[in-house]
Image (cartoon, rainbow, N blue to C red):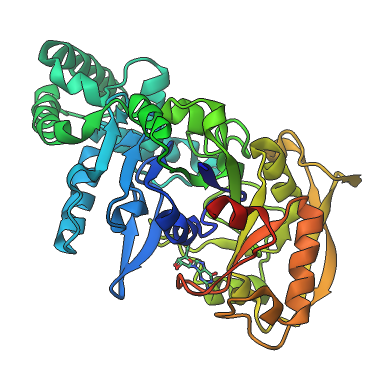
Amino acid sequence: MNIAVLGAQYGDEGKGKIVDLLTPHFSIVARYQGGHNAGHTVYVSGRKFVLHLIPSGILHEGVTCIIGNGVVVDPQALFAEIDELAGLGIDVGDRLLISDKAHLILPYHRELDILSEARRGERKIGTTSRGIGPAYEDKIGRRGVRVCDLTDRQALADEVRENVQARNQIIKDSTLDWRAVYDELLIQGERLRRWAGDVSLFLDRARRDGRRIMFEGAQGTMLDIDHGSYPYVTSSNASIGGVCTGLGVPPRAIGGVLGVAKAYLTRVGEGPMPTELFGELGHRLRESGQEYGASTGRPRRCGWYDAVAVRYAVRVNGIDAIALTKLDVLDGLETIDICTGYLVNGAPVDELPADIAAAGDIVPVYETWPGWSAPTKGVTRFEALPVEARRYVARLEEVSGVPVGLISTGSDRAETIIREDQPLAAWLR
Ligand code: GDP
């Protein structure tokens, strides 16, 4: 069965480990949105390695990795990743396929990103400043440059000239020469060519041949451009719809949906986060969870598990099971709160407000559960968890409206509980 693995919170849920762990059950891993702002931390021979663009499936021999049309590709960042992998002795070879319809991030997109954040001042989004937003803007504005556009020299020259001239009018004192951008693109196009192709067709054939596909999401549902906490969102569909539009596959291609959620909550950048903890507790979660951005090193905002947000993610994505990560980070806490609802401007609310960023004053409603004193770190069987931890997980299932199929109790692959009686285990058989 093909499954989608996506973030059920605000990103950084620990999808990297889950995808890496499940990869041996699949022969294809396909990314459908985002850019090199994603950051999956993986360990190769004890060395920490952060993959931004190429699916971490590349570390598994024989697995084909796909970058779909819904992804925006910075060729420089892509080549840097390919070269770094080569330095580790991993040859990307023919195991990488990039959609010829994927849009490119061009040198001036980054500049525009920084400029747009500076303009917003206090209202800044907190983007990673990698040019991803502006690249998607050009895509929607129908002036983007796609991988396949690199082969038609005349059309490319016209497009790049017009775009650069328009950008030079926006960016004060910019003297960017379109020819330099164009020449660079031609060189990059030469190198990209061997990996470019028709992703939709490839995946269709793969499905007919019975090859199993994992659809890998970046960021999380609450950062989705349509369904997230707009405008504090990323510029793509991180939620389930992105699989179809970002790869050219039909909904029926998706057999199961695994939502990844932390046992607490984090958020990077600006925007609403009702369960945010500011004092000692927030600090405690940040330090024991090592909550610093994999891509940017920025400290993450930390808080309690927000079941309102996860219920929403379950609804929007049709999540069948949750992979609950970082349970061990809660080890040693005397009590643990779960947010089960909100008071919005004083009125009790069960469902996420349609526009959470504009909903007004949101106060979380908490239940307080006892913590556990014995560690969960490294535990591999559900029954071996302290009883309080089992109760905590059971309560998260109830308030989130979905079973927990997998529990991660540490960053290592082995530090994982796969629950045999829950959907995920059946999908993998
Ligand atoms: P992603 O982008 O969703 O993969 O999230 P990140 O890469 O930002 O966060 C994952 C980080 O947490 C990595 O350093 C992982 O090794 C680590 N991690 C993943 N699962 C667990 C877990 O269950 N417990 C602990 N302590 N760390 C974990």
The location of residue 366, given as percent across then percent down, is: 83, 62
| Residue that appears at 75% across and 73% down | 390
In this picture, residue 382 sits left or right of residue 88: right
Report the number of discs: 0
The foreground one among 172 and 180 is 180
User: In the rendered view, would you say 182 is above or below 36?
Assistant: above
The foreground one among 276 and 324 is 324
In this picture, residue 403 sits left or right of residue 228: right
Camera sees residue 338? no
User: In the rendered view, would you say 252 is above or below 277?
Assistant: above
Q: Residue furthest bottom?
A: 374
Q: Residue furthest right?
A: 347
Location of the C terminus (image quadrant): bottom right
In this picture, residue 125 sits left or right of residue 226: left
Q: Quadrant of residue 392?
A: bottom right
The location of residue 99, given as percent across then percent down, is: 30, 29
The foreground one among 309 and 97 is 97
The location of residue 231, given as percent across then percent down, is: 58, 35
The location of residue 171, given as percent across then percent down, is: 29, 28
Camera sees residue 236? yes
Q: Quadrant of residue 111?
A: top left
| Residue that appears at 72% across and 39% down | 315
User: In the rendered view, would you say 289 is above or below 203?
Assistant: below
In this picture, residue 228 sits left or right of residue 140: right
Q: Quadrant of residue 129?
A: top left
